[in-house]
Image: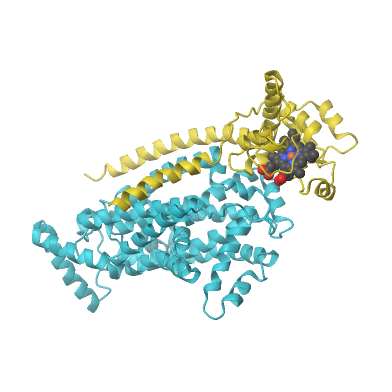
Chain colours: A cyan, B yellow
């Protein structure tokens, strides 16, 4: 019977061939480490946010007179409302954590290089959408940090040439952040996740056309590729279990550690909090914004600091495979970059003093320097590695890689369909 | 190099300055019914005249397990579903103190330091050299020294005020997060379940991967 149903469907819709092509026959390098779990985890958290978000929206009121109370209504009167709300607020942090690890893995292993540039750029687009969604969601509880965070960030659009003031008013729907702002942020906060889902589909189509990278950085021969299902479904679900344990510790035992105390005070436009801090996932970018003395300069620097990742395929000029694995200098650069981000995060968190400002400026320079020097360092490193003599196997691979790229330029669809 | 050392050194100083900013007396709140019940008592006697707790209903107190007769006495002729509103209106308080007393429902979550902040604030009153009352934690506060800490001289009196402060802070901590105990209880079940599930998933993964030689 089930067979007949599937036959009936296959006659009208490519179900079996789809499952075969994308899951049971989708070739995946068998040497992937657990760092390759984070894309799947990001997809899971996205679904979790959508599911909890829809139920929260059933009880939430987007009205400046009601929204703060409606959150307390959810927390106190709605059955398991506290669970929904804490899952959603913790989920936002989890989303960024997972995405940042996913990005760090890509950077470390050089997975953004040819032929995966489009994959990387759709990911960059997803990051921007995620940031916008999180930023708008943060306004909804209408606490002090919600209000002042949104005020500070929308104010930045004053840096727009010629139309600065108009753009700010256009974004807020009013002269200040108010009811109009809250309603539109709610509407868009509900819309954006669905745009994200669409962008994820594009991201996955790109992935399935170029296939996963792997720690060796070399396209593996067919014998070293195994079908995604059941091998990687099993591995991803095991990783999901670990993730859920960590997530639950936060949701059930320390959910308030991720909520600024000041956001438990209703928004008050007449009273600026002592010190306005964004959520942890924006801190490094916020520190860069504050490190530039001039406002327009700060906005440009902050925008660049997010967008520079997109240039990595052009900046990294080394053809040594495996990213940080076979490239000692790049590896050091990578860890320094992580350190700089942590320092920036700290600078963004503490109240500014003369000293933290200087540290922030140094770290900002190092942040941009990390990108700026990549082309030179990567080229020099490649030459040095060649001179020192790469393992014969790797040298051969670089050469064939160059050939491959040349061939791919002539015939971009050549790589399709190597199945184990 | 010198510059680097200066930066690193000042980095440490910066952290320590920042840490010493908040000198809080930490308090371990008690979320048991007797402590919270005493806390509600203090709230009703000493704070309710000025402060509201608009997210707490009298019924919530009964549900938590507080003596129904006491709750009835506190609410007078108000319905059980009435919230704990202040006896003084905001505008009167504004006129009298120059600042409206904030709602206390979320107070234990609304300041850095949480319950310990409120505890240290209530106990932070002292008499300044010029004879005026002051507060260590919030020097410019408009709230008078309600618990009488600045006037308390002998040790017994101070201890009594401290335990009173702990009771009220315990109640405020409960009020800010009434689901905490249920959350923890459920959390242990969820974690236990997830540990078993994850272990099974680990076995499944190993078994499937064992097919590859």
Give the residue drawn at x 58%, y 52%.
A52
| Residue sitting at the far front | B130
| Residue sitting at the far right | B77
B155 or A272, nearer to the observer: B155
Lateral position of residue A402 relative to residue A86, left or right = left
A86 or B1, nearer to the observer: B1
Give the residue drawn at x 42%, y 38%.
B198
| Residue sitting at the far top | B156
A101 or A119, nearer to the observer: A101
From the top left corner, tell me how far across and down residue A419 is, in percent: 26, 60
Give the vertical position of A235 relative to A407 (above or below): above
Question: Residue A205, can we see it?
Answer: yes
Q: How many marks?
A: 0
From the top left corner, tell me how far across and down residue B42 is, in percent: 76, 30
From the top left corner, tell me how far across and down residue B92 is, in percent: 85, 48
Question: Residue A11, can we see it?
Answer: no
From the top left corner, tell me how far across and down residue A88 is, in percent: 56, 50
Give the residue drawn at x 59%, y 62%.
A150
Lateral position of residue A281 relative to residue A108, left or right = right
Quadrant (top left, top right, bottom left, bottom right) of the C terminus of chain A? bottom left
Give the vertical position of A288 relative to B43 (above or below): below
């Amino acid at each position: 019977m089930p067979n007949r149903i599937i036959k009936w469907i296959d006659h009208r819709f490519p179900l079996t061939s789809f499952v075969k092509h994308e899951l049971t026959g989708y070739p995946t390098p068998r040497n992937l480490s657990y760092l390759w779990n984070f894309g799947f985890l990001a997809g899971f958290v996205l679904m979790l946010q959508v599911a909890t978000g829809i139920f929260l929206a059933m009880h939430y009121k987007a009205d400046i007179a009601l929204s703060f109370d409606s959150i307390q209504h959810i927390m106190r009167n709605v059955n398991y409302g506290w669970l929904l709300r804490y899952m959603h607020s913790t989920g936002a942090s989890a989303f960024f954590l997972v995405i940042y690890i996913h990005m760090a893995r890509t950077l470390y292993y050089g997975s953004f290089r040819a032929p995966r540039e489009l994959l990387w750029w759709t990911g960059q687009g997803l990051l921007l959408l995620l940031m916008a969604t999180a930023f708008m969601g943060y306004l909804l509880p209408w606490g002090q940090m919600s209000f002042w965070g949104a005020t500070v960030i929308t104010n930045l659009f004053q840096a727009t040439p010629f139309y600065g003031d108009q753009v700010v008013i256009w974004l807020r729907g009013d002269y200040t952040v108010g009811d109009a702002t809250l309603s539109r942020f709610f509407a868009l906060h509900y819309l954006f996740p669905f745009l994200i889902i669409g962008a994820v589909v594009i991201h996955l189509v790109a992935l399935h056309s170029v296939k996963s990278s792997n720690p060796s950085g070399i396209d593996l021969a067919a014998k070293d590729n195994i079908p995604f299902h059941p091998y990687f479904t099993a591995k991803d679900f095991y990783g999901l279990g670990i993730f859920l344990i960590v997530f639950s510790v936060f949701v059930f035992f320390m959910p308030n550690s991720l909520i600024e105390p000041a956001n438990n005070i209703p928004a008050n436009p007449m009273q600026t909090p002592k010190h306005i801090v964004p959520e942890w996932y924006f801190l490094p970018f916020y520190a860069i914004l504050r490190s530039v003395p001039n406002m327009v300069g700060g906005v440009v620097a902050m925008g660049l600091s997010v967008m520079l990742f997109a240039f990595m395929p052009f900046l990294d000029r080394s053809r040594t495979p495996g990213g940080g694995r076979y490239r000692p200098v790049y590896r050091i650069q990578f860890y320094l970059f992580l350190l700089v981000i942590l320092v920036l995060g700290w600078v963004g968190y503490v109240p500014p003093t003369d000293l933290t400002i200087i540290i922030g400026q140094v770290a900002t320079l190092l942040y941009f320097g990390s990108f700026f020097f990549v082309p030179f360092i990567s080229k020099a490193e490649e030459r040095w590695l060649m001179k020192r003599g790469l393992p014969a196997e790797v040298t051969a691979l670089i050469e064939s890689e160059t050939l491959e790229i040349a061939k791919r330029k002539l015939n971009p669809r050549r790589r399709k369909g190597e199945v184990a | 190099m010198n510059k680097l050392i200066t930066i690193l050194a000042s980095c440490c100083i910066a952290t320590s300055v920042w840490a010493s900013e908040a000198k809080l007396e930490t308090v371990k709140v008690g979320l048991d019914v007797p402590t919270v019940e005493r806390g509600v008592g203090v709230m009703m006697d000493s704070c309710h005249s000025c402060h509201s707790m608009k997210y707490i209903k009298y019924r919530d107190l009964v549900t938590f397990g507080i003596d129904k007769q006491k709750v009835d006495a506190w609410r007078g002729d108000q319905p059980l579903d009435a919230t704990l509103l202040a006896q003084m209106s905001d505008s009167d308080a504004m006129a009298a103190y120059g600042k409206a007393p904030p709602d206390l429902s979320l107070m234990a979550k609304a300041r850095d330091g949480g319950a310990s902040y409120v505890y240290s604030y209530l106990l932070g009153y002292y008499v300044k050299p010029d004879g005026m009352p002051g507060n260590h934690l919030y020097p410019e506060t408009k709230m008078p020294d309600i618990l009488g800490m600045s006037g308390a001289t002998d040790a017994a009196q101070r201890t009594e005020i401290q335990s009173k402060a702990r009771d009220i802070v315990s109640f405020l901590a409960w009020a800010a997060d009434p689901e905490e105990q249920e959350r923890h209880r459920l959390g242990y079940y969820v974690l236990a379940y997830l540990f078993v599930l994850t272990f099974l998933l680990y076995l499944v993964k190993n078994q499937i991967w064992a097919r590859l030689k």
